[in-house]
Image (tube, coloured by chain):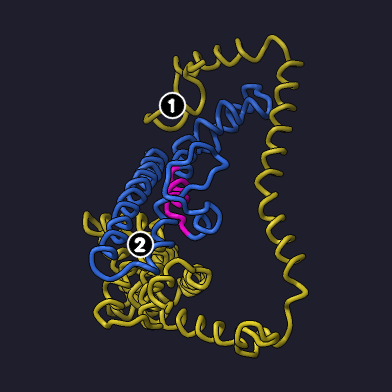
Chain colours: A yellow, B blue
């Protein structure tokens, strides 16, 4: 069943010409002409299958939200967000310390990662060639690296030499986790600024640094904010990294 | 995939499913492969979710219903109670293995993504 068909035109790109097209048309006619009824049936079956697949992929999401709400909603109260935990066994209390701590750690991580990430993205934008390509590839691979690996790295770099767990080490680990995401999303945001606008700035005699600041960063502001917020969101939901830098 | 491929298949009289099967899927093939590879890389590196439910037994389970463990869950579960020194180095060695495996899978996925981008440019 592996006859060459439409879409399978390898490297020659675009529409096949002459003989190739004629041959493909032959093949498609030969396959599709005989029984329209059967084609329709196959189409319906496939559509049904796709519908089932969509349901299956939505089920975990809906199930998760519904279950968490059902089991957890009665435990939500104002105190949960404003009080610190009571000792085990004593009712009441909240998790305000965890919320504040989380905000501090993520905030510090963002302070560390965002400037470096945007500067790195600028480098990728301005530089072409092998170095930039390698960095881009590495950043992409790092995006998918398990969080515990980054956590252990922070442990080796900060926790062990300083001999105790710390919020700083936690922030460092989260910054490492955010960095590749920030670099790649910032780069694509800045790439969306039209080249002609940069060229226009340079043509007016504006210095390069000023062009970057006003035109590239200014023009990409919305995209930069979105990308960086996504990175922060990822850090907020992270648990594995902090296991090695903060507990005890 | 190129939208013209889809239009061409439609123009040749393909039903909706035939268009998908013969034009959309082949055209998006590398992209799909890349997506699957990257998703596998994610799953390989996942530790917490696995550590919570597998039971963390240090055996090769003989049944899908028996407790087992993965690299990630082993790291999570042992790191907290190991003593400094050789023990800790062993856990870190596990991390190195995990890192190497996931980085390799991810790199493969990225290469696939890049081949796709190049094919679309030409």
Q: Where is residue A130 in the image (x, y as percent from the top left)?
A: 21, 54
Can residue A196 be seen here? no
SS type, badge 1: loop
Can residue A172 be seen here? yes
Chain on which label 2 sits: A
Q: How many marks?
A: 2
Q: Mark 2 points at which residue?
A: A149
Left or right of residue B36, residue B65 in this image: right
Q: In which quarter of the image is the C terminus of chain B?
A: top left
Q: Which residue is drawn at 50% across and 14% down?
A: A22
Q: Is residue B41 above or below residue A161?
A: above
Given residues B121 and B110, the one toward you in this image is B110
Chain on which label 1 sits: A
In the picture, the disc for residue A9 is 1
Task: Residue B44: say if magenta.
Answer: yes
Write down the region rendered in magenta. B37-47
Choose top left, top right, bottom left or bottom right for residue A67: bottom right
Spatial CA distance of label 1 from label 2 is 42 Å
Please tell me how crowded label 1 is: few (under 14), some (14-19), or many (20+) other residues with Cα within 10 Å.
some
């Amino acid at each position: 069943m592996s006859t060459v068909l439409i879409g399978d035109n390898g490297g020659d790109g675009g529409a096949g010409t002459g003989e190739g097209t004629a041959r493909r048309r032959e093949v498609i006619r030969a396959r599709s002409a005989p029984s329209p009824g059967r084609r329709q049936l196959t189409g319906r079956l496939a559509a049904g299958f796709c519908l089932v697949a969509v349901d299956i992929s939505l089920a975990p999401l809906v199930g998760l939200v519904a279950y968490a709400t059902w089991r957890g909603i009665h435990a939500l109260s104002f105190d949960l967000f404003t009080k610190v935990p009571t000792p085990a066994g004593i009712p009441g209390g909240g998790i305000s310390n965890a919320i504040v701590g989380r905000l501090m750690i993520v905030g510090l991580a963002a302070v560390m990662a965002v400037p470096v990430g945007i500067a790195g993205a600028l480098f990728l934008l301005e530089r072409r060639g092998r170095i930039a390509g390698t960095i881009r590839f590495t950043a992409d691979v790092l995006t998918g690296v398990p969080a515990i690996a980054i956590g252990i790295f922070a442990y080796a770099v900060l926790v062990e030499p300083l001999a105790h767990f710390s919020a700083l080490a936690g922030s460092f680990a989260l910054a490492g986790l955010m960095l590749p995401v920030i670099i790649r999303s910032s780069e694509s945001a800045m790439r969306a600024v039209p080249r002609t606008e940069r060229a226009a700035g340079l043509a007016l005699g504006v210095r390069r640094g000023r062009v970057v600041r006003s035109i590239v960063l200014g023009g990409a502001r919305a995209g930069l904010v979105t990308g960086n917020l996504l990175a922060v969101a990822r850090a907020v939901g992270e648990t594995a990294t902090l296991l090695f830098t903060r507990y005890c | 995939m190129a939208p013209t491929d889809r239009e061409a298949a439609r123009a040749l009289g393909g039903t909706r499913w035939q268009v998908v099967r013969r034009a959309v899927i082949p055209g998006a093939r590398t992209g799909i492969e890349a997506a699957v590879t990257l998703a596998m890389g994610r799953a390989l590196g996942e530790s917490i979710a696995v550590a919570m439910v597998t039971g963390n037994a240090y055996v090769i389970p003989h049944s899908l219903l028996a407790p087992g463990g993965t690299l990630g869950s082993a790291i999570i579960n042992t790191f907290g109670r190991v003593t400094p020194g050789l023990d800790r180095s062993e856990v870190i060695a596990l991390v190195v293995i995990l890192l190497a495996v996931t980085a390799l899978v991810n790199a493969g996925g990225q290469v696939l993504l890049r081949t796709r981008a190049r094919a679309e440019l030409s």
